[in-house]
Image (tube, helix red, strand yellow):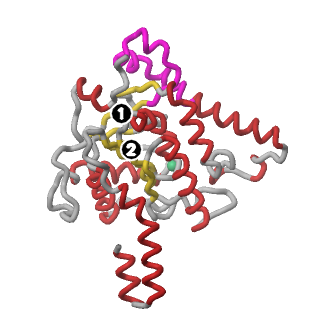
Amino acid sequence: MKLLQHLGARFGCALCFAGAALLLLWHVPNLAAAAPPADGKLRIIVFGAHPDDCEIQAGGVSALWAAQGHHVKFVSVSNGDIGHWRDAGGPLARRRTAEVEAADKLLGAVTEVLDIHDGEVLPTLENRRMLTRLIREWQADIVIGPRPNDYHPDHRYTSVLVQDAAYMVTVPFFCPDVPALQRNPVFLYSPDSFQKPNPFQADIAVSIDAVLQKKLDALAVIESQFYEGGANGSANLIPSDPEKQKERKRSIRESFARRNQSLARRFAGKLAEFYGADQAAKVQHAEAFELCEYGRQPAKEEWKRLFPFFEK
Ligand SMILES: [Zn+2]
């Protein structure tokens, strides 16, 4: 709305009012996404640095939540506008936004891509306010983000921004334009393989076997990053032979499936804790999360309420 006021104040012409109306329409999905209905369902907000991070890290568990009617929102903190070997700038940001919108629709999540340049995410006060407002507007029960010792600066600073919001979401006179949360959400980290200063430790692990194909279908939509290889790709990755194209797409699906298989193996003990040994032994693909010490610290029973997937 600030943009509309700015345009109107600056030009005050009919063209601008027409443009403003179009912009307003364009923003309607985001306005609708600002607050899910108070229907007693869970509200989960996932932050990734780029348009593909949320889908890789939490695509499976989000599909499980969404299938039960819980409300999931994926936020990409950057617009991804340098994440390709051939394309860049506005057209790439638009393409990547369209990709995650289509992918998230398959998973049942709402999408928001913030207009911050890729490679330039910083833990500024302005961004702290923005993430605080997003978590409050979603009235989140669960917030998921990356760990602060990831290799990519955007991932690290997205993590710091989420951590910085973890307490501030409860403080009424910080961003008083959006009411503070009465109850601090549970903040979770998504996994990575970095060992220093401390390796990822799972506090919760969930079987995604039931939704694996849906997750792989959603990731397949994000062609700029996986099929075309993103920032470190090249024209050589894309075969001209249609049979080889199919083969490449199949191998991408397999590599993502293997990633979730390795999480299931790595956190088999945690799966057994939540599913029982017999059922856990059958799990092939998993997603896992680590509890951040800054938000609410759930007891065992609350974990099962927040992740309502363990009862048969
Ligand atoms: Zn990323």
In the image, taking residue 168 as reference, residue 7 lies left or right, namely right
Residue at the disc numbered 1: 290
- Mark closest to the chain's N terminus, 1 or 2: 2
The quarter of the displayed image where residue 132 is located: bottom left
- The CA distance from mark 1 to mark 2 is 18 Å
Q: Residue at the location (64% across, 31% down)? A: 254
**Residue 293: image location, x then y, percent:** 26, 38
Helix, strand, or loop for circle 2? strand
- Badge 1 crowding class, 10 Å Cα cut-off, few under 14, some 14 to 19, many 20 or more, is many
Residue at the disc numbered 2: 72
Type of amino acid under label 2: Val
Q: Magenta includes 110?
A: no
**Residue 129: image location, x then y, percent:** 29, 61
Q: Is mark 2 within 8 Å of ligand 1?
A: no
Mark whose residue sits in front, 1 or 2: 2
Q: Which span of residues is magenta-colored?
A: 259-287
Helix, strand, or loop for circle 1? strand
Q: Looking at the figure, which quarter contains the N terminus?
A: bottom left
- Badge 2 crowding class, 10 Å Cα cut-off, few under 14, some 14 to 19, many 20 or more, is many
**Residue 163: image location, x then y, percent:** 30, 48
Label ID, residue 210: none
Labels in figure, total: 2
The secondary structure that most of the magenta stretch takes on is helix
Q: Residue at the location (39% across, 38% down)? A: 197
87 w.r.t. 287: above or below? below
Q: Residue at the location (33% across, 27% down)? A: 308
Please state which of residues 157 and 100 is positioned toward the viewer in this rendering.
100
93 w.r.t. 224: above or below? below
The quarter of the displayed image where residue 150 is located: top left
Q: Are marks 1 and 2 in contact (CB under 8 Å)?
A: no
Type of amino acid under label 1: Glu
Please state which of residues 141 and 152 is positioned toward the viewer in this rendering.
141
